[in-house]
Amino acid sequence: MTTLAIVGAGPGVGAAVARRFGAEGFDVALISRNQAKLDALAAELGEEGVTARGYAADVLEPASLNTALNAAAAELGPIAVLQYSPSVDRRYLKPVLETTAEDLHAALSFSVLGASTAVHAVLGGMRALGRGTLIFVNGGTAVRPRTDFAGTSVAFAAESAYTQTLHEALARESIYVRQLIVPGGISVDDPVTNPTAIAERIWGLHATRGEFREFHTPL
């Protein structure tokens, strides 16, 4: 079976993406910190016909993230698509003059080091398959920094630089790196920014090849 791994899986966009890829025959590895919530989501998806399993891991703990992704590949099959979209901690959303070096270190560990750990955990399997898609979902501060959201402004920009270099380096191996910028918030009542609409856009990033970066709505 072909496996999608979602780092940062939850009941909103993560669940919608799991359903969208599951409808295309993907098994789904759900990764976040809370095993009980993952198990409940996996059971819910299972009732809808999607094969899903939960693997608890923290992106700030490389060993746990490696263990989760390796277990998912062993149990569900090689990971052909990785979505990296962990929920942002409020501590990364402080004004720049209140943001310390420790805050920035944590934000960079979350956005860049966690992303790098996830990429290297799945890259060997994608190379063995001869294909793969790495999808990174970021907010608008990735391309337009805000003084009141210093942590994400710095860390998302660094993640963008890292992933764009991956895009250029891996395309020759048929491993494609895509970034989706979702400016503003996600609203379940909005026909454009609800989780199902965003999941459809993420499916399109995998199914069709285009530029590295796309915007879900205009910035």
Image (cartoon, grey):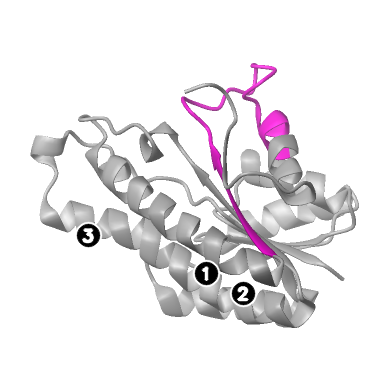
Question: Disc 3 marks which residue?
Answer: 105
* Element assignment for label 3: helix
- 118 over 96 or under it: above or below: below
Outermost top residue: 190
Amino acid at circle 2: Val
Which residue range is magenta in the image? 175-199
Residue nearest the observer in this picture, 177 or 65? 177
Residue 155: where, in percent of width, then height? 32, 50
Q: Are marks 3 and 1 in contact (CB under 8 Å)?
A: no
Is the N terminus in the top left, top right, bottom left or bottom right quadrant? bottom right
Callout 1 amino acid: Ala
| Residue to which mark 1 is pinned | 118
* Residue drawn at 52 percent across, 32 percent down: 182
Task: State which tag comes first along the sequence, 3 or 2.
Answer: 3
Residue plotted at (46% across, 25% down): 184
Instruction: Residue 131: give x, y in percent of width and height.
Output: 75, 69
Instruction: Please report whichever mark, 3 or 1, sits nearer to the chain's N-terminal start.
Output: 3
Real-space CA distance between mark 2 and mark 1, rounded to the nearest whole angstrom: 7 Å
Name the secondary structure under disc 1: helix
Crowd rating for badge 1 (residues with CA inside 10 Å; few <14, some 14–19, many 20+): many
Q: Nearer the viewer, residue 177 or 104?
A: 177
Q: CA distance from mark 3 to mark 2?
A: 24 Å
The residue identified by callout 2 is 122
Residue 51 appears in the rendering: yes
| Residue 215 part of the magenta segment | no
SS under mark 2:
helix
Q: Is residue 11 visible?
A: no
> Which residue: 42% across, 32% down?
140
Tags 2 and 1 in contact by the CB under 8 Å rule? yes
